Amino acid sequence: MAEPTIDAGAGPVALRRSPLAHLEERMHAAAVTGARGVRLTERPFLTMVNLRVDPTSDAAARIEKTLGAPLPRQCGRTTASGPHTVVWLGPDEWLVLSRADATAVAAELREALGGDPGSAVDVSANRTTLELSGPAARQVLEKGCPLDLHLRAFGPGQAVSTTVGPVAVLLWQVDGAPTYRLFPRSSFADYLARWLIDAMSEYRGPEVP
């Protein structure tokens, strides 16, 4: 049996495949338009760097200068500057989401840490990103998320760890459309995407009075 061949000029970036590439057409077909519209897409290969540092330290100040944004100090808060969004995960832990190159971002943060205690680890392959948007997006999430997602409690710019269905996710509301981004572990992404597709299906029909 012939051995599979790989193009010697194709690097790891060219060969990588997102966790939900096989569901792309199904997600597209599940989209609903109109006043009860909702759409699900994957935004693969987003840079994610896990950051640990004492927020009162000089290293934290150097990191904030590197990112161009303060480290959020409260649960649910995010800050943003340029290509970077910083999400609070714990009293001394954050997730840096970025459109910049993962290796470069992690290296810059490690340089800012210097010899002080802390860490900056590229965890981009740990999760993928699902984007749920449209007028009915909140109602879809409310079928399986224990959070109060009403604007009085959760709005644009907020991000928290929670569950959707049985899947643990980091949930970030990007804007008031509303648009949400969900960050599940890659190994659970298929289940979550299928759960959301099923939850979206009722919005194809007329609203029940």
Image (cartoon, rainbow, N blue to C red):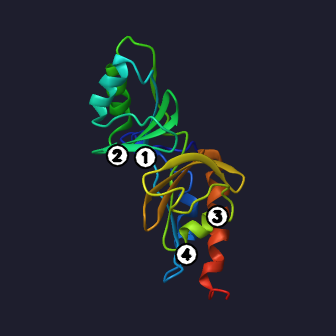
Vertical arrangement, residue 173 with respect to residue 206, above or below: above
Q: Secondary structure at mark 1?
A: loop
- Residue designated by label 2: 99
The kind of residue on which mark 3 rests is Glu
As measured in the structure, the alpha-carbon distance from the residue carrying label 4 to the one carrying label 3 is 22 Å
Q: Are marks 4 and 3 in contact (CB under 8 Å)?
A: no
Quadrant of image for the C terminus: bottom right
The kind of residue on which mark 1 rests is Leu
Crowding at label 4, few (<14), some or many (≥20) Cα neighbours within 10 Å? Answer: few
Vertical arrangement, residue 57 with respect to residue 15, above or below: above
- Residue designated by label 4: 29
Residue that lies at the very extreme toward the top in this rendered image: 115
20 and 56: which one is in front? 56
62 and 50: which one is in front? 62
Q: Are marks 2 and 1 in contact (CB under 8 Å)?
A: yes
Residue 139 pos. (x, y %)? 60, 69
Task: Inspect this view and state whether residue 66 appears.
Answer: yes
As measured in the structure, the alpha-carbon distance from the residue carrying label 3 to the one carrying label 2 is 29 Å
As measured in the structure, the alpha-carbon distance from the residue carrying label 4 to the one carrying label 2 is 27 Å
Q: Earlier in the sequence, mark 2 or mark 1?
A: 1
As measured in the structure, the alpha-carbon distance from the residue carrying label 2 to the one carrying label 1 is 6 Å
